[in-house]
Amino acid sequence: MFRKIGTIFLRDVAVNARDAVALMILLFPLVFAVGINLIIPGIYDTTVNIAMVRDTDESRAAFFAQFANVEQLADEQAVEARVTQRDSVLGIVRDGSGTVILTQGNETASQVDYAKLINVLFDANVQLSEARAELVEFGRTVPPIKKTMVNALLLFITIFAGMLIALNILEEKTDHTVRAINVSPTSRTAFILGKSMSGMLFAVLSSVACLLITGFSGIDIGQAVLVIVMGTLISLLVGFVQGLSSSDIMEAAGSVKLMFLPMIGSVVGYELLSAKWQVALYWSPFYWAYRANDLILSGRGTWPALLLYAGIILAICIIVYAALAPRIRKGLQ
């Protein structure tokens, strides 16, 4: 049986390797993960950008670099040209009367005041080691928006796994091999498990790769894999049904994409609704998966809590399977 499951899995791998739509599904999560790193700043990043003349006031430039993004240019004319560009950059130059802050006019008042304050602190010879302020992080080591986007990406990957299953089923229908299992030594159970392997393996590997790319390598990967596997089950079921009942790729993809609605609703509801109203989302496995992922990405996940969430997701999947099983059996006939 395991050999037959492996054969079906390897056939799906070969088919996906030469299918443009499947390759796009496989690569999209990785590209999106890289995009998250590019557009989301770190929790200690600053949006204040300073241009200064190189090799004229190195101590001041080093002090500013502790609080702002400092860009050193060749001369004062280059600094002025940099300030006049479309983005928001302040210039710091020296003249006979002291330090001059160059602005274009599109900078916010807070950015200008921030640059003035840093300059005053430097002139007063204030050192960071003398500061008496205490930084309280409230347990956050990554920007909340980055954690939210990575969490949503993990849910997207589970739906993409369902789309991959639908595409593989359509490939079997095109080759007229779905009905052939009824007269072949391959059981329906082996066929379903073999077809599920590609989607599940894609979900797990893509999710782990995205977590590593986005800088969440310090979390408990075992907890993350548990939630990913449970969350993918519902997508695989829907992918099976849509693949068996659809006549072409566009119809199957469109049907599976309807799962984005409850997924997005679960994310928005969790982030915006108070706890007493979130009971309206308890039916959604995406809600529990998002809630579990939030604990994992925050580093606050405990095995008892995550096993409870995984059990709830599994129970929902069993109910959905009981409802969809007749359609799956009919499609395999």
Image (spheres, rainbow, N blue to C red):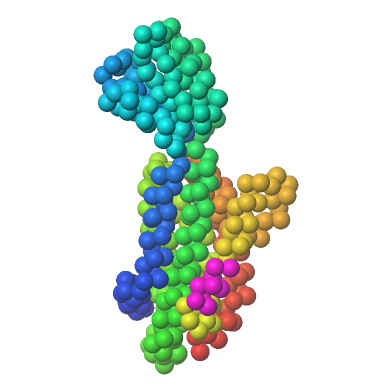
**Which one is in front, 208 or 153?**
153
Extreme residue in the right direction: 276
Total marks shown come to 0
Residue 112 location (% of width, % of height): 50, 23
The magenta segment is 250-258
**Which one is in front, 39 or 275?**
39
- Residue 220 in the magenta stretch? The answer is no
- Residue 253 in the magenta stretch? The answer is yes
Quadrant into which the N terminus falls: bottom left
Question: Residue at (36%, 30%) from the top-left corner?
Answer: 81
Question: Residue at (47%, 28%) from the top-left corner?
Answer: 104
Residue 286 location (% of width, % of height): 58, 58
Q: Does residue 66 appear anywhere in the picture?
A: no
Q: Is residue 101 above or below residue 286?
A: above
Question: Residue at (39%, 65%) from the top-left corner?
Answer: 24
Image-based side of 278 in relation to 187, left or right: right
Image-based side of 20 in relation to 243, left or right: left
**Which one is in front, 194 or 266?**
266
Question: Residue at (59%, 76%) from the top-left corner?
Answer: 324
**Which one is in front, 208 or 268?**
268
Residue 206 image-quadrant placement? bottom left
